[in-house]
Every structure is written in C-alpha cells, then in structure tokens.
Image: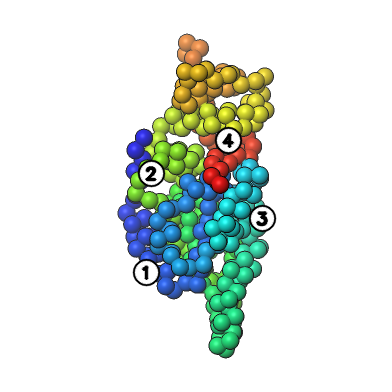
Amino acid sequence: MNIQWYPGHMTKTRRMIAEQIKNVDAVCEILDSRIPISSRNPDVDELTAGKPRLVVLNRVDQADPQATKRWADYFRSLGYAVLESDAKGGEGTAKFAGAVRELLADKLRAYAQKGQVGRVVRVMILGIPNVGKSTFINKIAGRKTAKTEDRPGVTRSKQWVPIDRGLELLDTPGILWPKFEDQSVGLNLAFTGAVKDDILDVETLGCHLMSYLAGQYPESLVTGYKLPSLPERKEEENDIAYGYRLLETVGRKRGFLISGGDVDTERMAKILLDEFRAGKLGRFTLEMPQN
C-alpha cells in the first residue's frame, strides 16, 4: 500500500514553519492520543530543533487510559512537557498556559532579570490535519478564533491568537508528510480520519480495523455489537480475510443484507469507522510505545 498525500498548501506550511520558528519561544505539538506516533509528523523534529517542546495528547476521552499513561511517560522520557487533553470537552485545556510557563521557567526568569517583566511568550502550535488543533486553540482562547471542521485540511494559513496579556499562539495549518513508508501509519491516520476517506478503500479499512480490535479489544466488539462471542481466527487468515469475516458476522447481526442474502460489508465498514471515530465502541489506542 503506497499512500502518497501532499497537497500544495502543506508544502507552503513547511516553509512557513521554517521561517517563523525563530519568532517563537516554544513549540506545542498536538497528537492524537490513540495514535501518538502515527500522528507525529517526522519532519517536525528537524523543523523545530532546539525549541522547548510541549506535547499535547488530545482526544484522551477516546483513548485507552492505561495506554495514555504509558505514552505520557514515554514523551516525558524524551524531555518533553506533556499535557493530556480532551479539547472538545475542555479537559486539560485550562492547564495549558501554566504548562507553557513551567516549560519556559528559565527563559522567563532570564527575561525578568533583564527587566523584561511581562514580556509576551509566543508558542507555535503544530499538528497534522483533523487532530483537534483548532478546537484546542478555541478552548484555550475562550472564544472561536480558529476555524474548525470534522475533516482534514481546514486551517490554511497562519494566524496569531492572543490567549492572555502574556501569551500568544501561532496557529498553523495541519501538515502531513509526502509518503507513508509504514503501512500501519497510513492505516492509523485513515482510521482516525486524519486523511480523507477517499484515499483508501473503506472496506479494506474496515477489515483492518475489525481485525485489530478483535485482537486487542475483543470484549468491546462483543459488547458493542451484541455478539455471543467473536469467531476464532483461522491459522491461514491474514488481517484482511479475518476482518472481512468479522464484518460479515456483525453486518448480518445488524441486518445489513443485500440481494441473495449476502452482507453489505461496505455499509458495515462505514458504520464501523463512524462508530469508532465517535467513541461509541469504547476507548482504544492503536499503537503502544516500544520501551
């Protein structure tokens, strides 16, 4: 699976980040807590080298709580400050300004010693499309400053957002990278809606997601779809084959039948993705730290 996705505005964003990095004191990187590595642009480390970093694990309300704790510990071990957030519900957003000032405590003390008390701190906000960046900024600002939609690629230009008298944010458009070398990264981004649904076949996506959830969170599927148990995976079945059989099982249970009594697996795949993204099946994390 060779997924390539790099609209022109993302090239401009990369250039803009490189130009503006000298104008900010710190960088805040917003990640999807369900896929913290897949939702990290690998270019960001190079583009923001040397700047203090705050990692926001967003959408914690949809992620596995134990996994989120492990991810928070992982990013702290790399030297980053970490904030857990549910931007839509507001959880964690009130702690943002304090977390930034704690991250920059040494720099703020140095400003104070030079008599620059009250100097405005500027933070660049980065994140891939549809990670909840604009919603997060709006919650922090207490007003609608950034345009939000539940689809990738809405923010198209940079904008400075004042938070209080001493803090300003630089909102940037979501930026992906030219090519996903690892198939699982592309799948994770597609599962969570970070890339448009027409990039990949929805039925294939549904098969992969069903197979993963059956392996890692079987009880959630049993409960969510009111099944007595999950069909056992056969030795010769790969993820696609097993996931397809699960789609058929669940689709038949839901009554999604077409002529001849076959299951409408495409419809079931769309329902699965919708319910997964809305958090209706439970709280899932799709990747774990390696250490």
Label at residue 270: none
Between the C-alphas of marks 3 and 4, the distance is: 22 Å
Between the C-alphas of marks 4 and 1, the distance is: 40 Å
User: SS of the residue at dot 1?
Assistant: helix
* Pair 4/1: label in front: 1
111 w.r.t. 157: above or below = below
Comes first in the chain, label 2 or label 3? 3
Given the image, on which type of amino acid does mark 4 rest?
A: Glu
Comes first in the chain, label 3 or label 4? 3
Given the image, on which type of amino acid does mark 3 rest?
A: Glu
Given the image, on which type of amino acid does mark 1 rest?
A: Glu
User: SS of the residue at dot 2?
Assistant: loop
Circle 1 residues within 10 Å: few <14, some 14–19, many ≥20: few
Comes first in the chain, label 4 or label 1? 1
Between the C-alphas of marks 2 and 4, the distance is: 25 Å
* Pair 2/4: label in front: 2
128 w.r.t. 236: above or below = below
* Pair 3/4: label in front: 3
Relative to the observer, which residue lies in front, 141 or 83? 83
Residues at discs 4 and 1 in contact (Cβ within 8 Å): no
* Pair 2/3: label in front: 2
The residue pinned by badge 3 equals 91
58 w.r.t. 279: above or below = below
Circle 3 residues within 10 Å: few <14, some 14–19, many ≥20: some
User: SS of the residue at dot 4?
Assistant: helix
Q: Position of residue 112 (x, y in %)?
A: 59, 84
User: SS of the residue at dot 3?
Assistant: loop
The residue pinned by badge 4 equals 275
The residue pinned by badge 1 equals 19
Residue in view at x 56 percent, y 82 percent: 110
280 w.r.t. 139: above or below = above
